[in-house]
Amino acid sequence: MIWKKFTIETSVEAEDLVAAYLEEQGFPGAEISDSQPLTEDEMKQMYVDVPLIPEGDQETAYVSVYLEENLSQEEIQALKENVEAELKRLSEFLPTGTGRITVEETSDDSTWQDNWKQYYQPFRLEEDIVIRPVWTEYADIRPEDKVVNISSVMAFGTGTHETTRLCIGQLRKYLKEGQSVFDVGCGSGILAILSVLLGAGYVHGLDIDPQAVISSKENAEANGLSRDRIDFSCGNLLAGNIIGARTEEEKESYRKASLGSGIAAVNPVQLVDLAMGEEDTVPARTYDIVVANILADVIIPLSGVIPRYLVPGGIFITSGISTDRAGDVRQAMRKNGFEILDTVEMGEWVSVVAKIGE
């Protein structure tokens, strides 16, 4: 679909007022862009893990709304005049910037998906782990480095967040050469790919978002990893999209396990890859390690489902847990037959590692 992007160049002080005015005029959901760096608290609240690099004039802000293509030139002109009048009124109380207004035609998916790339640069995640976007160069590569090439990134999945670092530390501690790993909620596939680089013999990544699966597959290809080493599929273990659940009895057991999870269930008899237009491409199996870097409210109900995917004595590595929910996670794990092995904190986040009975 083609849209008209209506953008007002204003000041940081006025950006919220301008956005509120546009909402009053019937254009909700304004997009605000400025070069003000996020505070540490804001990054934690937003669960942001993209290493944003502020640049440009930090006093200028851009407030944009998207107008439907069928909006007439007369209606657009009337909106411009109304905004100009409002900016003039606001300027009596605070700086409003240049007030320049531009209208440009754009598609809803033509360029915005690539705009973030200029802010995502290579970085050293740990002493011997480098995350390298494929469109950049990074001179500081050492012979011993494990380099993860990234060609596609979801909103969450660049590898810099504390929860991801916690998972990597636990994988280093518990993963043994040649073992299998199931990454539940794989995002952009970074943990799954790192698992291979850390010695896993086979890794399966699962995500409820089809776009995440596409992103993960592209990243695996960027690292030269074949599907016999790493594969991805789309599904929700808490909504009955269960790998290998072929009988009605199996499907019903998973359906019961998901009750009260807070996850909206879709058709509980869906196969895992139905959202991708495929049939279950990843064979049913158990794994030596399951890793879930999600949130406590998802990990708690998952703890009743994951045992079916673990070999006897298998390890469940979790992260994305806020410090105030760690006790709830441990309690749910014990209730579902796990022995707690490890709890590690980083900032306000916690990783809990548990072992299923042998």
Image (spheres, helix red, strand yellow):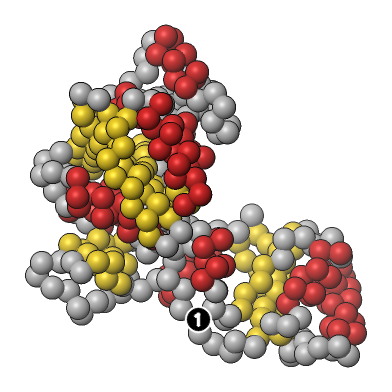
- The answer to whether residue 31 is above or below residue 352 is below
Q: What amino acid does circle 1 point to?
A: Pro
Give the residue at x 22% y 64%. Answer: 129
* Quarter of the figure with the C terminus: top left
The picture places residue 350, in percent across and down from the top left corner, at 40, 52
Residue at screen point 42% across, 9% down: 249
Does 193 sit above or below residue 236?
below
Tell me where residue 279 sits by quadrant: top left
- Asked whether 219 or 20 is in front, the reply is 20
Query: Foreground residue, 177 or 349?
Result: 349
* Mark 1, secondary structure of its residue: loop
Image quadrant for the N terminus?
A: bottom right
Residue pictured at 43% horizontal, 50% vertical: 320
Residue located at (55% from left, 61% from top): 46
Instruction: Assess disc 1: are there few (<14), some (14-19) or many (≥20) residues with their C-alpha within 10 Å of its C-alpha.
Output: few
Q: Is residue 46 left or right of residue 214?
A: right
Q: Which residue is mark 1?
A: 54
- Evaluate whether residue 184 shows in this view: yes
Residue 83 lies in what quarter of the image?
Answer: bottom right
As drawn, is 227 to the left or to the right of 280? left
Q: Position of residue 149 (x, y in %)?
A: 26, 62
How many discs mark residues in the rendered view?
1
The percent coordinates of residue 87 (x first, y second) are 84, 83
